Image (cartoon, rainbow, N blue to C red):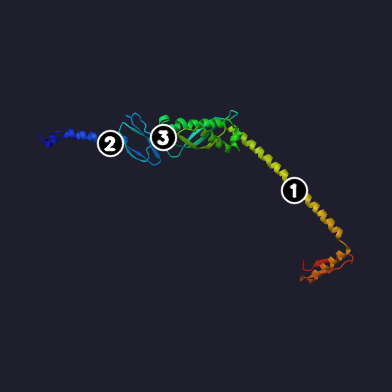
Amino acid sequence: MTFRETVKAHQVKIVSVLFLIIFGILLLAPSMFVYVYPGQAGVFFRALSNEPLGSPVHREGLYFIAPWNQMYVYDVTRQKHSVDVSALTNNGLAVSMRVSALFQPNSEELRTLATEYGPDYSEKIIFPTINSAVRHVIGEHTPEALYTSERSGLHAAILAESQERFVGLPFKVDDVIIENLVLPAAVNDAIEEKLRVQQGALAYAFLLEKQESETQRLKIEAEGIRTYQEIVSSNLTPELLQWLQIRAMYDLADSDNSKVIVIGDSEKLPLLLDGSAN
């Protein structure tokens, strides 16, 4: 029997086998061809090797692996995730807040990250640690401090506490952001009332200071007027008054406006009337 006759005789079996091979390749293709995209890095797991996790980190590219092996791909860019935290202040009052963490795994230590923490390391390590750091810092503050001026320092304290706890781990936390802070309603109302009273006291103190300054100004002005009058009175001689009279009459006579001059007693100044007035 020739080859062609053999193929023709087993045509159905051959087509079925080829179909199964093609179907198997298509089925296993997602696990055999692995893409590592920009911003990602991979750790190669060899199931039949004495050292299953390879040391080199696989960068961007297309990789062909055996179906029984695995490529663990990690996002190595800076990531942001949020978590809701409930904590107690130093006087036992509960506050709630939403905290966001900016973190990034160390791409050179992905083997350690995969071995000790796995792909869900953020849920296992990062957020429980940040949660603990937030509660520790909140427990050292009063509700008033969280509400007012010390709130700016709260962010720095939580960030420092978190970063201290992540020293030596295969990832770093760049920032911890407090997106929302909610105090109990009764505490919030009491703090707002206290602030209103404080602002009212400050406004009253400012008003008193302003009035004191105005009193001082009027006192200085009165003393200046008195000194001026004393100086002028001591220098008003009959000769000076007569010279001022002559000067005023000269200026009036030299003007273009109509006028009436009524001369009184020679010992007194003249009465000057403007003839153009209605």
Mark identifier at residue 26: 2
Q: Mark 2, mark 1: which one is toward the viewer?
A: 2
Q: Quadrant of residue 73?
A: top left
List x then y, in percent, for residue 177: 52, 38
Which disc number belongs to residue 214? 1
SS for callout 2: helix
In the rendered view, does 247 fall on the left or right side of 12? right
Q: Nearer the viewer, residue 9 or 194?
A: 9
Q: Is residue 119 visible?
A: no
> Where is residue 102 shown, x and y percent of the image?
48, 38
3 or 2: tag closer to the N-terminus = 2
Horizontal relation, residue 239 to residue 88: left or right: right
Label 1, label 3: how many angstroms apart (C-alpha)?
72 Å
Q: Are marks 3 and 2 in contact (CB under 8 Å)?
A: no
Q: Is 222 placed left or right of 196 in the picture?
A: right
What's the residue at 62%, 36% (across, down)?
192
Which residue carries the number 3 mark? 110
Q: Earlier in the sequence, mark 2 or mark 1?
A: 2
